[in-house]
Image: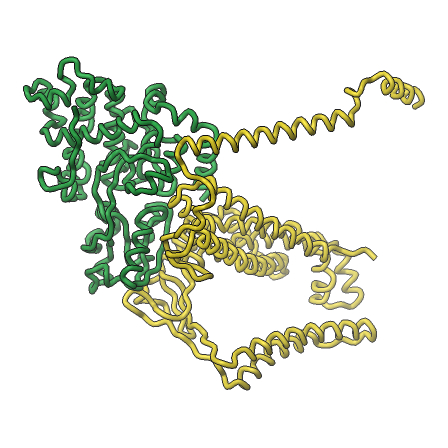
Chain colours: A green, B yellow
């Protein structure tokens, strides 16, 4: 509570005093201080979590690293601000962070009344339910959950979808609401609630951290659209473009078969599209038009790999989460991942 | 003396208006005031300007929008179709509820422990000392976590509920007990209760007047208990026992029916009560020790018994010392209730936080929080000051 009020007050104070500086060119500010301040989750395995040595890693963290690599050519020039669901927006509005990459759902009101711009979608998700199958053997559908106690994190679209879903299906429930993800996890694990609800990717991630992961099942229903993506403040189009095209470059690289391993050879490719994307075209102006160097895509791919590599390493088959690509497959392979052309 | 007078007269005639201390102090006060107004104005103006520039909507219009989320504990009807404004009212009432019952319990426990610590019984006084030292020296947030995570969340699941007398159950989802359903005619019982209380008050007044006039005492306590309990009981049977119960029954997920006290509320209520009680105990002890020993000796010499001495001589004087610091403890308890957010009890801060995040109106919500807590604390202060002035020793 104290931290929340403090964040709120500091946020308010910062809005009053410092926002004038923050709304100027963010790229210049970032270059001047020498690092990118990136808002991430406080700890969601696979998406953003620190390892034993305190190094942050994950699918959302890769976006931070990619942007830093595009600007500085060095993916380590990032400082991470772990934010709760509740703190994240104030942190971005007040200029405390330059970029919010924290499994945040893109919605109309966040785009408008919060004053943000979403730089695309890096994960197409949907809200699901998880239950302890050992304690509730008869339940295999979300429509059987009437009367259940449901653990949910406050200040999320999840909380609103939950209310809508139970209302639409004429079911009752007891919301058990916490501010921090760790608190929700602990409450669910101790049996305070029958059901845990959040984005399905999150459920798979959280299941790994429970005392007995195998006892828990994710129910088949998906009750919402949750396009998750990085967000920036409104009013700085150049900065918005940099984040947007960094994400697009990662997707384009996957389409073109450019990986972190072959990026150096690819620079010598005869394919004009690959040459253009990697900044090898004679008198190319693409990087400069963003305010970056011409080899920015090369730096991004070297640092985090293409979109598919980042996916598999953090949350896909190369990780304990083993999430299938599904909707997040390239459009050419039946998914929704589609980047506008880099030219 | 005389030379000083001359000196001052001299300087007064010579000095300009600049050196007049009275005018100087007024000028400086005006300067500070203007500077303060300008600083506040600058901050407000800057904030509005920056909010506008960052395209963040502001104002209190959002209070009328649909909330869209549900609240587990609501004293007034609330659904996801209600407004953000109503959600804040629900949060405010939840804060008031936990603060009110917490203050009552903390006061009772605190007085018992405080008196117990002065007991001549070695065991009682040591137990009370240990209690005070333990709870006073642990941060309230940890006490809350102790009750929530250490005591309530390790209770069994609903299927293996602990059965208590009167069809009550205790499990990790809370404390369940039968709900009384009053049938027609129950109003007479309430009327009987009110009549009983009124008559007790009247009897007490008459008894005091008689004692003042004749010195004869009257057993007021037993008469009052008889009236307050007896009259409603007679009314209850006279109306043919208009009462039935709705018992909690095990459903798929939980016990359904009856009343439920959620573990979040229980944890917060117990933690705040026991934490604050340790401070109140010390205040009570200080108050009693602050009454000079000669007062009790004089009272014994007049032939009053130990109980009468405590009730008629020591406590009234101790109250003078006790009440002002007691006010601070009540304010602390109310403000500490905002720690509820850590265990998910939907108080004003928790719900305000949800709204802050759903709407992004951080400045407005923080302002509402501050105004409400300020108002709540000032109201408590005003009441306690009034109580204090009533209890203060009136010199005759």
Q: Position of residue B288 (x, y in %)?
A: 68, 55
Q: Is residue B327 above or below residue B109?
A: above
Q: Is B333 on the left-hand or right-hand side of B2? A: left
Count all numbered tags in the image, as a single digit: 0
Q: Position of residue B394 (x, y in %)?
A: 78, 56
Image quadrant in which you'd find residue A95: top left
The C terminus of chain A - image quarter: top left
The N terminus of chain A - image quarter: top left
Q: Position of residue A102 (x, y in %)?
A: 29, 38
The residue depicted at 35 percent of the width and 23 percent of the height is A25
The residue depicted at 17 percent of the width and 16 percent of the height is A284
Q: Is A137 on the left-hand or right-hand side of B173? A: left
Image quadrant in which you'd find residue B388: bottom right
Q: Position of residue A189 (x, y in %)?
A: 29, 53
- Is residue B210 or residue A75 the one in the foreground? A75
Q: Residue furthest top?
A: A283
Q: Is residue B267 above or below residue B356?
A: below
């Amino acid at each position: 509570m104290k931290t929340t009020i403090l964040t709120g007050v500091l946020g308010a104070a910062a809005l009053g005093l410092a926002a004038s500086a923050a709304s100027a060119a963010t790229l210049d500010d970032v270059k001047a201080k020498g690092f990118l301040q990136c808002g991430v989750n406080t700890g969601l395995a696979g998406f953003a979590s620190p390892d034993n040595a305190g190094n942050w890693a994950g699918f959302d963290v890769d976006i931070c690293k990619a942007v830093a690599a595009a600007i500085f050519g060095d993916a380590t020039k990032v400082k991470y601000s772990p934010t709760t669901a509740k703190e994240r927006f104030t942190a971005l509005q007040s200029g405390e962070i330059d970029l919010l990459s924290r499994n945040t759902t893109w919605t109309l009101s966040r785009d408008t009344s919060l004053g943000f711009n979403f730089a695309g979608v890096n994960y197409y998700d949907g809200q699901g339910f998880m239950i302890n199958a050992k304690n509730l053997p008869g339940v295999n559908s979300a429509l059987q959950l009437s009367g259940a106690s449901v653990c949910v994190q406050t200040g999320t679209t999840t909380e609103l979808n939950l209310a809508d879903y139970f209302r639409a299906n004429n079911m009752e429930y007891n919301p058990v609401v916490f501010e921090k993800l760790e608190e929700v996890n602990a409450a669910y694990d101790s049996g305070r609630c029958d059901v845990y609800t959040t984005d399905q990717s999150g459920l798979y991630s959280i299941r790994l951290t429970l005392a007995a992961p195998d006892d828990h099942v994710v129910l088949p229903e998906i009750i919402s659209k949750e396009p998750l993506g990085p967000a920036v403040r409104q009013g700085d189009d150049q900065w918005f473009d940099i984040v947007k095209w960094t994400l697009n470059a990662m997707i384009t690289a996957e389409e073109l078969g450019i990986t972190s391993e072959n990026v150096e050879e690819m620079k010598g490719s005869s394919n004009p599209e690959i040459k253009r994307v990697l900044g090898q075209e004679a008198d190319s102006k693409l990087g400069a038009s963003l305010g970056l160097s011409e080899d920015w895509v090369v730096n991004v791919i070297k640092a985090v790999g293409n979109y598919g590599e980042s996916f598999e390493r953090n949350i896909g088959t190369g990780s304990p989460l083993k999430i299938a690509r599904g909707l997040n497959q390239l459009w050419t392979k039946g998914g929704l991942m589609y980047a506008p052309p880099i030219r | 003396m005389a030379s000083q007078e001359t000196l001052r007269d001299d300087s007064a005639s010579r000095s300009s208006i600049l050196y007049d201390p009275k005018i100087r102090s007024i000028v400086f006060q005006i300067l500070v005031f203007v500077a303060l107004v300008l600083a506040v104005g600058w901050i407000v103006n800057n904030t509005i300007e920056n909010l506008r520039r960052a395209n963040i909507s502001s104002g209190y219009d959002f209070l009328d929008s649909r909330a869209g989320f549900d609240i587990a504990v609501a004293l007034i009807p609330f659904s996801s179709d209600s407004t953000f404004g109503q959600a804040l009212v629900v949060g405010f009432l939840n804060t008031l509820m936990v603060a009110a019952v917490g203050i009552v319990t903390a006061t009772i426990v605190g007085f018992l422990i405080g008196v117990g610590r002065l007991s001549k019984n070695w065991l009682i006084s040591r137990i009370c000392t240990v209690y005070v030292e333990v709870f006073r020296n642990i941060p309230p947030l940890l006490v809350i976590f102790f009750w929530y995570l250490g005591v309530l969340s390790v209770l069994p699941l609903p299927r293996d509920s602990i059965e208590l007398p009167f069809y009550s159950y205790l499990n990790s989802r809370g404390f369940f007990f039968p709900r009384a359903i009053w049938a027609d005619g129950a109003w007479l019982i309430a009327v009987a209760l009110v009549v009983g209380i009124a008559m007790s008050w009247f009897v007490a007044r008459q008894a005091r007047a008689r004692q003042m006039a004749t010195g004869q005492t009257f057993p007021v306590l037993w008469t009052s208990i008889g009236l307050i309990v007896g009259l409603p009981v007679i009314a209850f049977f006279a109306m043919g026992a208009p009462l039935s119960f709705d018992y909690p029954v095990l459903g798929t997920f939980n016990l359904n029916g009856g009343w439920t006290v959620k573990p979040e509320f229980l944890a917060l209520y117990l933690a705040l009560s026991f934490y604050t009680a340790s401070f109140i105990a010390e205040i009570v002890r200080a108050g009693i020790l602050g009454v000079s020993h000669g007062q009790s000796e004089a009272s014994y010499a007049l032939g009053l018994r130990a109980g009468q001495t405590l009730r008629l001589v020591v406590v009234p004087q101790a109250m003078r010392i006790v009440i002002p610091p007691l006010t601070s403890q009540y304010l602390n308890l109310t403000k500490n209730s905002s720690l509820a957010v850590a265990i998910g009890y939907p108080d004003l801060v928790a719900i305000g936080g949800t709204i802050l995040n759903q709407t992004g109106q951080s400045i407005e919500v923080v302002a509402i929080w501050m105004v409400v807590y300020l108002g709540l604390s000032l109201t408590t202060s005003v009441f306690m000051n009034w109580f204090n002035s009533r209890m203060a020793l009136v010199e005759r």
